[in-house]
Image (spheres, rainbow, N blue to C red):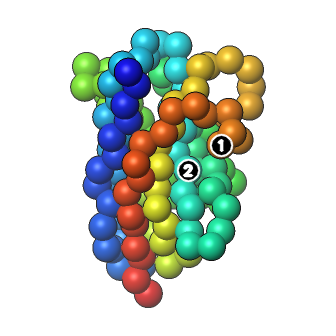
Amino acid sequence: QVQLVESGGGLVQAEGSLRLSCAAFGLTFSRYTMGWFRQAPGKERVFVGAIRWSDGRTYYAESVKGRITISRDNPENTVYLQMNSLKPEGTAVYYCAAKYSRGNDYSLYSLYPYWGQGTQVTVSS
């Protein structure tokens, strides 16, 4: 059974930093791409970034490029989302998700069958 467990959310001031973790269980990791998405109240879930587990290749949304880094720790089966220079509009529930590393599309949330429970990030101005 696939299980994704996020942690690391919280309250941070604008321009601060936060690192989220996503521990993955029940996956053959080399076959998956791990994505991060966020959803603000009343808004759609949007792509933040992703990492292909097999080779560590990363993909970032243009809106956050340069301010985030996604990495993986193979022995710990954990993916990280490091966020710097956070802005109040970054306030959202952040989710990690997993999909087979098939095709070139990694930004559509509908392609991800497995999701974590989400972790709240609040950025104060």
- Furthest toward the left, the residue is 76
Specify whether residue 75 is in view. Answer: yes
- Furthest toward the bottom, the residue is 125
For the residues labelled 2 and 1, the Cα–Cα distance comes to 8 Å
Is 43 situated above or below 110? below
Instruction: Name the residue located 49 percent from the left edge and 67 percent from the top edge.
Output: 92
The reply to whether dot 2 and dot 1 touch (C-beta < 8 Å) is yes
Instruction: Name the residue located 43 percent from the left edge and 12 percent from the top edge.
Output: 28
Q: Which residue is mark 1?
A: 109
**Circle 1 Cα neighbour tier, 10 Å, few/some/many (<14 / 14–19 / ≥20):** some
| Residue in front for this viewpoint, 113 or 79 | 113
Q: Position of residue 86 (x, y in %)?
A: 46, 69
Instruction: Name the residue located 48 percent from the left edge and 72 percent from the top edge.
Output: 91
Is 7 situated above or below 15? above
Image-based side of 77 in relation to 69, left or right: left
Quadrant in the picture for the N terminus: top left
Element under disc 2? strand
Marker disc for residue 9 = none
Instruction: Name the residue located 44 percent from the left edge and 87 percent from the top edge.
Output: 125
Q: Position of residue 11 (x, y in %)?
A: 31, 73
- Which amino acid type corresponds to the residue marked 1 in the rendered image? Tyr
- Which amino acid type corresponds to the residue marked 2 in the rendered image? Phe
Image-based side of 91 in relation to 109, left or right: left
- Furthest toward the front, the residue is 1
Is 90 situated above or below 54? below
Q: Which residue is mark 2?
A: 37
Image-based side of 111 in relation to 119, left or right: right
Q: Position of residue 41 (x, y in %)?
A: 56, 73
Element under disc 1? helix
